[in-house]
Image: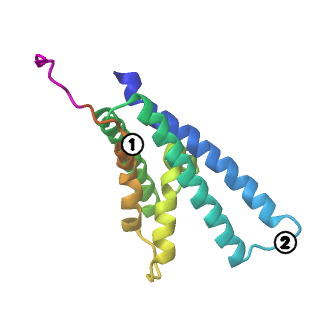
Amino acid sequence: MMKKLLVLPALTLIGSAILRIADVITSAILVAGTSEWTLEKGTTAFYVRLILSVILFVIIGIILRRNYDRKTIAKSATLLVIYSIVIFALEQITQYYGTYSMIFYWLYIPFEIFTIITWALARISTAENINWIYAIPSLLAPYLFVLFGKRYVRRSKVRFARR
């Protein structure tokens, strides 16, 4: 049972690693031949990341769909949500005290595919300052994988006689 619960975090870890590699490649391509980063390049990088995040999300969902029911996916998502909330809280505490560690960059990897939600909210928001409230949808996003889960319907084994 424990192996089943670790499948979603493992898949998001792999997907997020792919996303980070794609971010590096995208940045290298956008900066090639120029020495400055413009708003247009930032927008392009955002949309590339958005599209890749959605594709990875759907691929992970399809993989989960083949083998897991909604209850198992919900339990696995809960593990990922608890992990992300703990990491987020530790990050906020260290920022409050002015000592941000780069270790959080690595600790966020299993959760990286969901950060696009926060980025999108920040882009459409008219607020000048972005605060921790924007992160809440990203923190709860692993529960979206429940939509991919199978719904097991138990059927009774009562057979009707033919006439």
Residue 101 visible in the displayed image: no
From what the image shows, is residue 15 above or below residue 132?
Answer: above
* Rendered residue at 35%/53% (across/down): 140
Relative side of 114 to 46, left or right: left
Q: Nearer the viewer, residue 51 or 110?
A: 51
- Is 57 above or below relative to 63? below
Among all residues in the image, which is located at the extreme right? 33
Residue 126 percent coordinates (x, y): 45, 83
Give 128 or 4, whichever is nearer the viewer: 4
- Residue kind at label 2, given as amino acid type: Ser
Q: Quadrant of the C terminus?
A: top left
Residue 157's spot in the image, x, y percent? 15, 18
Toward which corner of the image does residue 155 lie, by quadrant? top left
Instruction: Read off the magenta span.
Output: 153-163
Q: Secondary structure at mark 2?
A: loop
The disc labelled 1 sits on which kind of residue? Answer: Phe
Q: Which mark is residue 136?
A: none
* Residue that label 1 marks: 148
- Badge 2 crowding class, 10 Å Cα cut-off, few under 14, some 14 to 19, many 20 or more, is few
User: Looking at the image, which residue sits at the far front?
Assistant: 163
